[in-house]
Image (cartoon, rainbow, N blue to C red):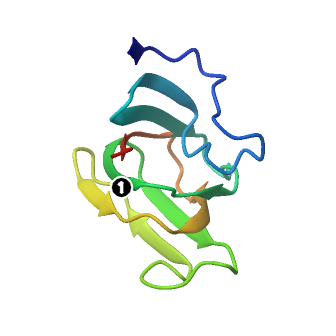
């Protein structure tokens, strides 16, 4: 089964799986998210239930604000410059919020690997 997102989808009622702004595509193997934040905006608290590939599209500076329940590689506040086209491997397990600490709108695509 292949579906396209309308932007209002969430597979859990607690919202912790809402890692992006809207779902662009989903099937049984992957879910592709679009994520946007305006300067100074902080995203919702979310849990990375699966491994992800994140691709930065635009922006200038972003921060990751981890929840107290997070441990491991991403258990402390991190801030970095945005490099359009740069990609990251993000392992499951983190609980965090993204914050746009730059002066430009931020845009990324996340590919969630469900299997």
On screen, residue 41 versus residue 34, left or right, reads: right
Of the pair 34 and 3, the residue shown nearer to us: 3
Residue 6, horizontal then vertical, whole percent: 57, 14
Residue 80, horizontal then vertical, whole percent: 40, 68
Residue 40, horizontal then vertical, whole percent: 66, 52
Q: Secondary structure at mark 1?
A: loop
On screen, residue 31 versus residue 86, left or right, reads: right
Please name the residue that numbered disc 1 is placed on.
82
Residue 27, horizontal then vertical, whole percent: 38, 25
Residue 82 sits in quarter: bottom left
x 62%, y 42%: residue: 18
On screen, residue 14 versus residue 90, left or right, reads: right
x 54%, y 40%: residue: 20
Q: Identify the image quadrant of the N terminus.
A: top left
Of the pair 99 and 88, the residue shown nearer to us: 88
Vertical relation: 58 (above or below) 93: above
- Disc count in the image? 1
| Crowding near the residue tagged with mark 1, few <14, some 14–19, many ≥20 C-alpha atoms within 10 Å | some
x 77%, y 47%: residue: 14
Vertical relation: 87 (above or below) 29: below
Vertical relation: 17 (above or below) 66: above
């Amino acid at each position: 089964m292949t579906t396209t997102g309308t932007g209002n989808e969430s597979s859990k009622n607690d919202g912790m799986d809402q890692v992006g702004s809207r779902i662009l595509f989903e099937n049984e193997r992957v879910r592709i998210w679009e994520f946007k934040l305006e300067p100074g905006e902080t995203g919702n608290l979310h849990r990375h239930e699966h491994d992800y590939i994140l691709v930065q599209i635009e922006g200038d500076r972003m921060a990751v604000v981890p929840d107290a329940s997070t441990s491991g590689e991403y258990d402390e506040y991190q801030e970095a410059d945005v490099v359009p086209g740069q990609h990251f491997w993000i392992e499951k397990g983190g609980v965090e919020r993204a914050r746009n600490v730059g002066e430009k709108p931020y845009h990324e695509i996340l590919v969630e690997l469900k299997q």
